[in-house]
Amino acid sequence: MSAVPQVFLGSEVVEKHLHCASLLSPSLEAALANFSSGAEGGVVQPLRTWCRFLGVMPAYNSKDDALTTKLVTFYEHKKDSSVPSHQATILLFDPRNGSLKAIMDGSVITAKRTAAVSAIATKFLMPADSEVLCILGAGVQAYSHYEVFTEQFSFKEVSQGLHLKGEDLFFSIIFSVTPITNNVYNN
């Protein structure tokens, strides 16, 4: 083990340091460019490995000298909905010797990273005259996408839709940026 004590960063600490997803965008844009450059980019990111309820996602970035692994568990908690179905932990290692440097709650990082990468793609692909953002879903990812997209882009309207499986209910919540209004539609 390393002489440096390991650090645990819980979700509250991670949220404090990543209070807005757009803080991640410059670093993620560089990492995506490096990854897309193949071997010259210095990013090694094998495909995810799944073992029943556990996903393992290692990565190494030689340009930033960063070695990490994300562990994700997936369980449907039908009896206890207070526990998220996906829970992530990120391990940060010293790439010189493999010593564990930090253990971080990965749920906040995952939500904000996913939304920030979506915003990067949108920056390059969105037509200039786009006025409406539509978010399908209502979970953690929907909220994090709403947060980063409204930080980085201007929309006249944001709409959110969710279809609940097994029920005869389809509802769409329509947001007008100012003021916010909610409308529920029944089929």
Image: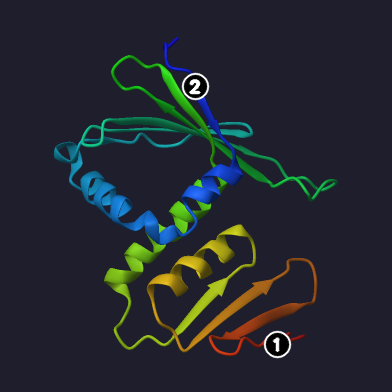
Q: Give the crowd class for mark 1: few <14, some 14-19, many >=20 residues within 10 Å.
A: few
Q: Name the front one of labels 2 and 1.
A: 2
Any mark on residue 140, and which?
none
Image: 78 above or below 153: above
Residue 60 rendering spot, x and y as whole percentages: 31, 32
Secondary element at tag 2: loop
Q: How is the image coloured?
A: rainbow
N-terminal of the two: label 2 or label 1?
Answer: 2
Per the image, the residue denoted by label 1 is 183
Q: Quadrant of the N terminus?
A: top left
**Residue at image coords 23%, 48%:** 36
Q: Give the crowd class for mark 2: few <14, some 14-19, many >=20 residues within 10 Å.
A: some
Q: Quadrant of the C terminus?
A: bottom right
Residue 101 occupies which quadrant of the picture? top left
**Residue at image coords 35%, 22%:** 94
Between 170 and 112, the one lying in front of the other is 112
**Residue at image coords 85%, 46%:** 79
Per the image, the residue denoted by label 2 is 6
Between 35 and 97, the one lying in front of the other is 97
Residue 55 rendering spot, x and y as whole percentages: 54, 34
Image: 113 above or below 46: below
What type is the residue that disc 2 sits on?
Answer: Gln
Residue 75 rendering spot, x and y as whole percentages: 70, 41
What type is the residue that disc 1 sits on?
Answer: Asn
**Residue at image coords 73%, 66%:** 165
Q: On the picture, is 184 further left or further right than 91?
A: right
